[in-house]
Image: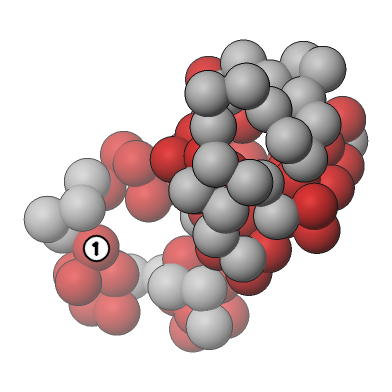
Amino acid sequence: MDAVLRHGCEAAFVSLLVEFGADLNLVKWDSLGPESRGRRKVDPEALQIFKEARSIPRTLLSLRRVAVRRALGKHRLHLIPSLPLPDPIKKFLLYE
């Protein structure tokens, strides 16, 4: 997340990282403005999305999805369709 903000990436990248469970507390940008010393120009829209996401706790549903996917590990995510779970849960875990 820090690299996405530091390099002025678009807001869509920030949204994607937030949705897929990025740890927003690792970024130490408490009083960050669009022009920050030692950093390239930060996209103001991306910065706003980051600040909003950081101020609002994630839903339990979102946290569960991230926890299950982490427990499976990235090398076993392709096995989600074969799990003995109802289809809506599989789609949920696959972000469909």
Disc 1: which residue: 77
Task: Decide: few, some or many residues near mark 1? Use Cα within 10 Å; few <14, some 14-19, many ≥20.
Answer: some
Residue 63 visible (yes or no): yes
Q: Position of residue 28 (x, y in %)?
A: 62, 16
Q: Position of residue 48 (x, y in %)?
A: 84, 47
Look at 70% across and 55% down and name the residue there. Answer: 43
Q: Nearer the viewer, residue 87 or 38?
A: 38
Q: Is residue 49 visible?
A: no
Using residue 24 as the reference point, say whether residue 78 is left or right of it. left
Q: Secondary structure at mark 1?
A: helix
Q: Nearer the viewer, residue 14 or 61?
A: 14
The quarter holding residue 10 reads: bottom right
The spot of residue 55 in percent (x, y) is 87, 30
Q: Nearer the viewer, residue 92 or 19?
A: 19
Image side of residue 72 versus residue 96, left or right: left
Amino acid carrying label 1: it is Leu
